[in-house]
Image (cartoon, helix red, strand yellow):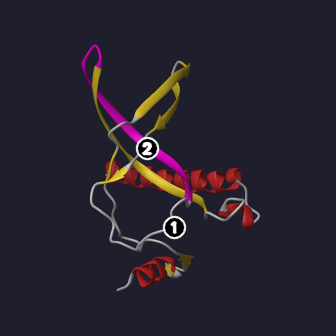
Amino acid sequence: MAKCEKREFYNQLKDYNGQKYSGMSVGGKHSWIYTDGIWNEIKISPEIWKFEFISLKNRRHQAPPGTGALNRTEYHWYILADQKVVKLDENKYNTKMKGLKFKIGHKRPNWRMWSYNYKHESYEDKIIQILENVIEQLKTKKKEREILTFF
């Protein structure tokens, strides 16, 4: 498959449970290496920390030539994660984080706005929808666990 054909397949409209999308097929996987990551955080209440993570991420395995989005395409993600750490000594912690990464939007190199702005949606609308869905899933999971432990 030529470079142009691979990009065309990537950009082709796909369907997932009635939802139209383009890009990597559902089930596709990436593995990234963050070698120079910097995590900055500030405690804003007894139980809440505000953080920022900055890094250049590199593919663990090279992408096939001619695939994926155009260079300079930007992506906007919202991340919900569960982080567990073990203190090893005064200065080191072993960290494991897993969670969900939600695509909020994208901005192609020649676009002035994010994709959700073209749909007359706001960033806040997208986040509210995500959080409401996650809350419903958690409530359902909790009820199922309560039913199982009742008997």
- Residue at image position (67%, 59%) is 114
How far across and how far down the image is residue 26, in percent? 41, 72
Q: Residue at x 63, y 57 (%)?
A: 129
Q: Earlier in the sequence, mark 1 or mark 2?
A: 1
Residue 32 position, x and y percent, is 33, 52
Q: Could you say which quadrant of the image residue 21 lies in?
A: bottom right
Q: Main secondary structure of the magenta part?
A: strand
Residue for badge 1: 70
In the displayed structure, does residue 90 sit left or right of residue 129?
left
Identify which amino acid the numbered label 2 is placed on.
Ala
Q: Position of residue 4 (x, y in %)?
A: 45, 82
Give the magenta-colored segment's residue range: 74-91
Residue 72 horizontal/vertical position (percent)? 55, 59
Number of numbered labels in the structure image: 2
Let me know if residue 110 is in the magenta part.
no
Dot 2 crowding, Cα within 10 Å, few <14, some 14–19, many 20+: few
Above-or-below relation of 66 to 131: below
